[in-house]
Image: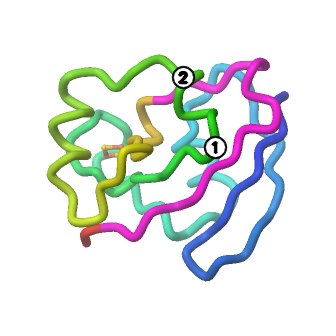
Amino acid sequence: MPKIQVTNLAGEVSNLDATSGNTLMEELRDNGYDDIEAVCGGVCSCASCHVYIEGDWDKKLDPRGEDEHQLVTSTDYFKENSRLSCQITMTDEMEGMVVKIATQDY
Ligand code: FES
């Protein structure tokens, strides 16, 4: 049950008790973070689950897969620490991870 910090598009910061084994997108979507639309349901084809992984957490995660990289780098709000949250599976080691929801292209 890693606790992570989430900043929404309004700049509001909150803590989320995530469940290991779920994706970050599922945790955000199912816990009322409405900025995450997740139109494709998590199959890496929409980019409407775009987040930034802040601090050095970005480097602790597995790197983007090819499909994720292609999709997220084509978004208008891409940054080096951009990720598609449906491609990140929560683990206990993510305790304290800091996530900022990105402006979505849609
Ligand atoms: S939910 Fe569509 S790419 Fe993540």
Q: Which mark is residue 55?
A: 1
The mark nearer the N terminus, 2 or 1, is 1
Q: Residue at x 27, y 36 (%)?
A: 44
Q: If the picture is divided into quarters, which one holds ligand 1?
A: top left
The reply to whether callout 2 and callout 1 are in contact (CB within 8 Å) is no
Q: Which residues are magenta?
A: 88-104
Q: Is residue 79 left or right of residue 60?
A: left
Q: CA distance from mark 2 to mark 1?
A: 12 Å
**Residue 90: x percent and y percent?**
64, 26
Q: Is residue 55 magenta?
A: no
The numbered dot on residue 61 is: 2
- Give left or right: position of 69 versus 104: left
Q: Answer with the quarter of the image where residue 56 lies.
A: top right
Locate residue 3, reporting x and y percent.
84, 39
Does 44 sit left or right of 67 as displayed? right
Q: Which mark is residue 23?
A: none
